[in-house]
Image (cartoon, rainbow, N blue to C red):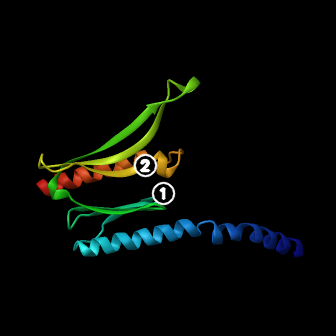
């Protein structure tokens, strides 16, 4: 019986610090970006119906205000963007890549993934939301491509729903 308690205590001593200290920085960043997104939604008189957090970015969709909200925060960049989807005709994913070097020359290396929002008005500029940038996010690509594709589909569905 004493050996079981001893083993549980030893395991707890090794595992608990990972939970306490491991997610601390990421949790603080997520909490700060979530607060920033909520404040941005309040400023624009809308409520967020769906959100997604990755790296140092957060995106939210407001169906009642028909807006896409985006906030990013890294060491040298803090940016908030609100896009009125009533002024957008199409959302698409743009991937910037280059050829690999040496033996990997037949491989494509993704350098940047952006969610591109094309305006209804041809005179208005195209809006690009940075989902992944190898210079900022590092060279390891996670699920950023899936996130970009998911949000392109969701914004296109929202645009289509508002045009009905």
Residue 66, position in %: x, y? Answer: 20, 62
Left or right of residue 140, residue 21 in this image: right
> Whole-Å distance between the Cαs marked 2 and 1?
9 Å
Left or right of residue 61, residue 9 in this image: right
> Which label is found at residue 138?
none
Looking at the rendered image, the quarter that the N terminus falls into is: bottom right
Q: Give the tally of numbered discs.
A: 2
Mark 2 residue crowding within 10 angstroms, few (<14) / some (14–19) / many (20+):
many
Q: Which residue matches tag 1?
A: 55
Q: Which residue matches tag 2?
A: 132
**What residue is at 88 percent from the left and 76 percent from the top?**
2
Residue 41, position in %: x, y? Answer: 28, 71
Instruction: Determine the image quadrant of residue 9.
Output: bottom right
Residues under numbered marks 2 and 1 in contact, where contact means CB atoms less than 8 Å apart: yes
> Can residue 29 be seen?
yes
Residue 111 position (above or below residue 131): above
Q: Secondary structure at mark 2?
A: strand
Q: Residue furthest right?
A: 2
**What residue is at 30 percent from the left and 68 percent from the top?**
48
Mark 2 or mark 1: name the one nearer the start of the chain: 1
> Can residue 149 be seen?
no
């Amino acid at each position: 019986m004493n050996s079981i308690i001893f083993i549980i205590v030893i395991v707890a001593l090794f595992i608990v610090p990972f939970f306490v200290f491991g997610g601390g920085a990421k949790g603080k960043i997520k909490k700060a970006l979530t607060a920033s997104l909520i404040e941005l939604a309040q400023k624009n008189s809308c409520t967020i119906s769906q959100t997604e957090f990755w790296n140092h970015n957060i995106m939210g969709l407001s169906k009642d205000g028909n807006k896409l909200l985006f906030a990013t925060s890294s060491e040298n960049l803090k940016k908030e963007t609100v896009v009125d989807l009533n002024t957008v005709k199409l959302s698409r994913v743009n991937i910037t890549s280059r050829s690999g070097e040496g033996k990997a020359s037949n491989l494509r290396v993704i350098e940047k993934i952006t969610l591109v929002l094309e305006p209804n008005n041809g005179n208005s500029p195209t809006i690009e939301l940075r989902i992944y940038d190898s210079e900022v996010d590092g060279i390891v690509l996670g699920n950023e491509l899936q996130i970009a594709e998911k949000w392109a589909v969701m914004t296109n569905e929202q645009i289509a729903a508002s045009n009905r």
